[in-house]
Image (cartoon, rainbow, N blue to C red):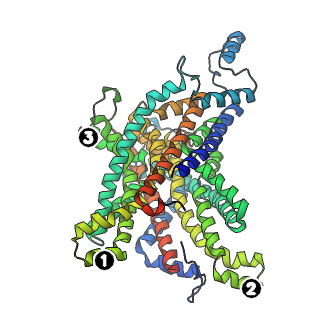
C-alpha cells in the first residue's frame, strides 16, 4: 500500500511539471504582457517594473526561477493586485471553493444515492421512471442555466433564500450555490447508483442472503450497498475535479469571492503568476482527489488491497 | 465492452441490427426527431425571417413573446428578434458540437487504435501521455487559450476538440486490445488475411459502433463546453450569439423579463437532452446486439 502510494505521488510530480510548463509557456510566448494597460508609462518606470518582476530576464531564466519558487511552494507575486502574492489570493479564495464544493458533493452523494437506491429497489415503478427522467434532465441542464433559474425562483420570486451577498456569512447563502453546483452530479450519481444497485441485487450472493431469510432491508444495506457503491466511488474523482472547476461558473453567477474569479480576471489581464499558480493548484487538487478516490476504492473492495 | 465476438450477425450487418434496435426505442426516435427539427429550424428560420440577429431596433426593446408580426419569442434588450437569435445560437452550438466532436473522434481513434494495435512501448508512452493530460485542468486551460489568442471562433473548435478526445482514446484502445485477442482475428490471420484487409474488415467494424456511441455522447459535452465559454464571455463575439451567451444575457434580465433566460435555456437543454438520449439508446442498441 505504502509503495503504491509512493509510486502514485512520484508520478504526480512530472504531471505537475507538465501542467506548470504548459501554463507558463502559453502565457509567456504569446504577445501582450501584464503591464500593457492604457496608461502610458515612461520607459524608465516600465524598466523598473520589468526588473521588479524579473520580466527583463531571458525566458529560460524566468522559467527556472518560477520552477524553483514553485518547488518551495511560492507561487510568486500577483501582477494585477499590487503587494499581494498569489499564495495570499489563493488563501482568500480557496476556502470559499472548498466550502461550496464540499457541501455540493455531500448533497450530490446523499440525494443522488438515495434517489438511485429508491429507483433500484422499485424497478419499473412510477417512482423509478420519475427518478430516471429527473436524472436525465439534471445531466442535460448545465449549471449556468440552473443557477440563474434557482435565483429567479427561490431568491427573486419566493424570497426564501438569498442569492448573493457572500460577505454577511450566514449559512443561507451557501444553499443556492451548493445546490446549483450539485444538481448535475446528483443526477449522475443517481443514475450510476441505480444501475449498480440493480446489478448488485441480481448477484448470486444476494439470492443466497434472501434464501437464508434475511429481510429485504438487511439484504440491501448489509450486502448490496457495498458493491453498489463501487462505481459511485470511482465517479467521485472526476466529479470532485468537475466541482472544483465548475465553481468558476457558480462564482460568476452568485458573485462569490472564490479562486475562479481571480483566475478569470487574471487571464484577462495577463496576470502570469495568478493564472499559472491557480492552474497548477487545480492540477494538484485533481491529482490528489483522484488518488483519494482510488484509495477509497481499495477500502471498499478488500480484494484490491492485496498486493498484486 | 467484452465479448465483441459477434462481429457479423446472421441477420445482416452490425449496422442494420443496431438500427433495428434503435428503431424499437421510441424515446431515441423522438430525440432524433426533435434534433432534426431544431437543426432544420436553425437552418431555415434565419434565412426566411424578416429580422436579423445583429441590428438593434430601439423602438421594440423587451417585446414579450407575442403572435404579432411573427415575434413568437419576443425581443431582447436591444430590440433584436429573439427567435432569430436563438436559431443562430442553435446553429453555432450544433456546428461547434459536431465539428469539435469530429476533431476529437479523429484524434481519439488514431491515438487509441495505435496504442492498442502496436502495444508495448508505444502503447505505454501514448497512454501515459493521456494519463498526464487527464490531470490538466481543462476548463481553466481553455479559458487561458481563449484569452491569449483572442476570441477566435476556429480556436473554440480546436481547443474543445483537442481536450475531449481523452476518453475516446482510452475506450478505443481497450476495444482494439480486446478485438486483437479474439479468435476470429487469429483465424483470419491463419487464413492469410493481409493486415490492411484485417483492419478494414474485422477491426474497424467492431470499433465503429463504439466510436459512434461515444461521438454521440461527446457532442453534448462539447456543446455544453462551448456554451460555458460563451456564458463566461469567452466564446462567440457579439453581436453573434450562441446559446451560452444568450443564457448569460437572459440571466442579466431575468427579474423583469424571464422569457429571455427561459427560452434559450430550454433550447440548450433540449439539444443536450436529445443527444444524451440518443447516445444512451445507441449504446444500449450496440450492447444488446453484442450481448
Chain letter for the residue marked with disc 3 in the picture: A
Instruction: Write down the quadrant of residue A226 in the picture.
Output: bottom left
In the depicted structure, whether residue B159 falls above or below residue B271:
above
Q: Please give the residue where the numbered disc 3 appears in the rendered image.
A: A157
In the depicted structure, whether residue B221 falls above or below residue A127:
above
Mark 2 vs mark 1: give the one in front: 1
Q: Please give the residue where the numbered disc 1 appears in the rendered image.
A: A208
The CA span between labels 3 and 2 is: 72 Å
Front-most of residues B167 and A235 = A235
Q: Tell me the SS state at disc 2.
A: helix
Residue B164 in view in this figure: yes
In the depicted structure, whether residue B83 falls above or below residue B150:
below
Residue B49 in view in this figure: no
Residues tagged by mark 3 and mark 2 found on one chain of the structure: no
Residues tagged by mark 3 and mark 1 found on one chain of the structure: yes
User: Residue A101: horizontal and vertical position, in percent?
Assistant: 40, 42
The CA span between labels 2 and 1 is: 46 Å
Mark 3 vs mark 1: give the one in front: 1
Mark found first going from the N terminus, 3 or 1: 3
Taking the spot 70% from the left edge, 65% from the top edge, the residue there is B119
Q: Please give the residue where the numbered disc 2 appears in the rendered image.
A: B190
User: Residue A113: horizontal and vertical position, in percent?
Assistant: 33, 57
Amino acid at each position: 500500500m505504502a509503495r503504491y502510494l509512493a509510486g502514485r505521488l512520484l508520478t504526480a510530480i512530472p504531471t505537475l511539471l507538465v501542467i506548470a510548463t504548459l501554463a507558463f509557456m502559453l502565457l509567456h510566448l504569446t504577445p501582450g504582457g501584464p503591464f500593457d494597460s492604457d496608461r502610458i508609462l515612461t520607459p524608465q518606470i516600465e524598466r523598473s517594473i520589468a526588473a521588479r518582476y524579473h520580466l527583463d530576464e531571458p525566458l529560460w531564466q524566468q522559467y527556472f526561477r518560477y520552477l524553483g519558487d514553485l518547488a518551495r511552494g511560492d507561487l510568486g507575486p500577483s501582477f494585477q493586485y499590487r503587494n499581494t502574492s498569489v499564495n495570499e489570493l489563493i488563501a482568500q479564495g480557496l476556502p470559499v471553493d472548498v466550502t461550496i464544493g464540499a457541501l455540493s458533493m455531500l448533497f450530490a452523494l446523499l440525494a443522488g444515492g438515495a434517489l438511485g437506491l429508491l429507483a433500484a429497489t422499485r424497478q419499473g415503478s412510477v417512482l423509478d421512471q420519475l427518478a430516471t427522467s429527473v436524472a436525465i434532465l439534471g445531466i442535460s441542464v448545465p449549471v449556468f442555466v440552473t443557477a440563474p433559474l434557482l435565483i429567479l425562483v427561490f431568491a427573486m420570486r419566493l424570497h426564501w433564500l438569498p442569492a448573493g451577498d457572500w460577505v454577511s456569512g450566514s449559512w443561507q447563502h451557501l444553499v443556492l450555490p451548493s445546490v446549483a453546483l450539485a444538481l448535475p452530479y446528483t443526477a449522475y450519481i443517481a443514475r450510476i447508483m441505480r444501475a449498480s444497485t440493480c446489478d448488485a441485487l441480481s448477484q448470486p450472493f444476494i439470492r443466497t442472503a434472501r434464501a437464508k431469510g434475511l429481510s429485504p432491508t438487511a439484504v440491501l444495506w448489509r450486502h448490496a450497498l457495498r458493491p453498489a457503491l463501487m462505481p459511485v466511488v470511482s465517479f467521485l474523482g472526476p466529479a470532485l475535479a468537475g466541482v472544483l472547476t465548475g465553481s468558476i461558473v457558480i462564482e460568476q453567477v452568485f458573485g462569490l469571492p472564490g479562486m475562479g474569479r481571480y483566475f478569470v480576471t487574471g487571464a484577462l489581464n495577463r496576470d502570469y503568476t495568478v493564472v499559472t499558480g491557480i492552474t497548477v493548484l487545480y492540477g494538484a487538487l485533481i491529482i490528489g482527489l483522484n488518488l483519494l478516490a482510488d484509495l477509497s476504492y481499495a477500502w471498499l473492495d478488500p480484494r484490491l488491497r492485496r498486493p498484486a | 465492452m467484452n465479448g465483441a465476438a459477434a462481429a457479423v450477425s446472421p441477420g445482416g450487418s452490425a449496422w442494420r441490427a443496431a438500427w433495428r434496435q434503435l428503431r424499437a426505442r421510441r424515446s431515441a426516435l423522438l430525440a432524433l426527431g426533435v434534433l432534426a427539427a431544431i437543426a432544420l429550424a436553425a437552418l431555415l428560420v434565419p434565412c426566411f425571417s424578416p429580422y436579423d440577429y445583429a441590428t438593434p431596433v430601439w423602438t421594440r426593446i423587451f417585446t414579450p413573446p407575442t403572435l404579432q408580426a411573427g415575434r413568437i419569442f419576443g425581443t431582447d434588450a436591444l430590440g433584436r428578434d429573439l427567435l432569430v437569435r436563438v436559431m443562430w445560437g442553435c446553429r453555432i452550438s450544433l456546428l461547434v458540437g459536431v465539428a469539435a466532436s469530429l476533431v476529437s473522434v479523429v484524434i481519439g481513434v488514431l491515438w487509441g487504435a495505435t496504442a492498442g494495435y502496436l502495444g508495448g512501448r508505444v502503447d505505454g508512452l501514448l497512454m501515459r501521455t493521456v494519463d498526464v493530460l487527464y490531470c490538466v485542468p481543462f476548463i481553466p486551460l481553455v479559458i487561458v487559450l481563449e484569452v491569449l489568442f483572442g476570441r477566435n471562433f476556429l480556436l473554440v473548435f480546436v481547443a474543445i476538440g483537442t481536450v475531449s478526445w481523452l476518453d475516446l482514446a482510452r475506450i478505443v484502445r481497450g476495444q482494439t486490445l480486446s478485438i486483437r485477442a479474439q479468435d476470429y482475428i487469429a483465424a483470419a490471420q491463419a487464413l492469410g488475411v493481409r493486415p490492411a484487409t484485417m483492419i478494414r474488415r474485422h477491426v474497424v467494424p467492431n470499433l465503429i459502433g463504439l466510436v459512434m456511441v461515444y461521438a454521440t455522447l461527446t457532442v453534448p459535452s462539447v456543446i455544453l463546453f462551448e456554451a460555458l465559454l460563451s456564458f463566461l464571455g469567452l466564446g462567440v463575439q457579439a453581436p453573434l450569439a450562441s446559446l451560452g451567451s444568450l443564457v448569460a444575457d437572459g440571466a442579466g434580465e431575468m427579474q423583469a423579463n424571464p422569457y429571455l433566460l427561459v427560452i434559450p435555456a430550454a433550447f440548450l437543454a433540449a439539444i443536450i437532452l436529445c443527444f444524451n438520449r440518443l447516445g444512451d439508446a445507441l449504446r444500449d442498441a450496440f450492447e444488446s446486439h453484442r450481448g
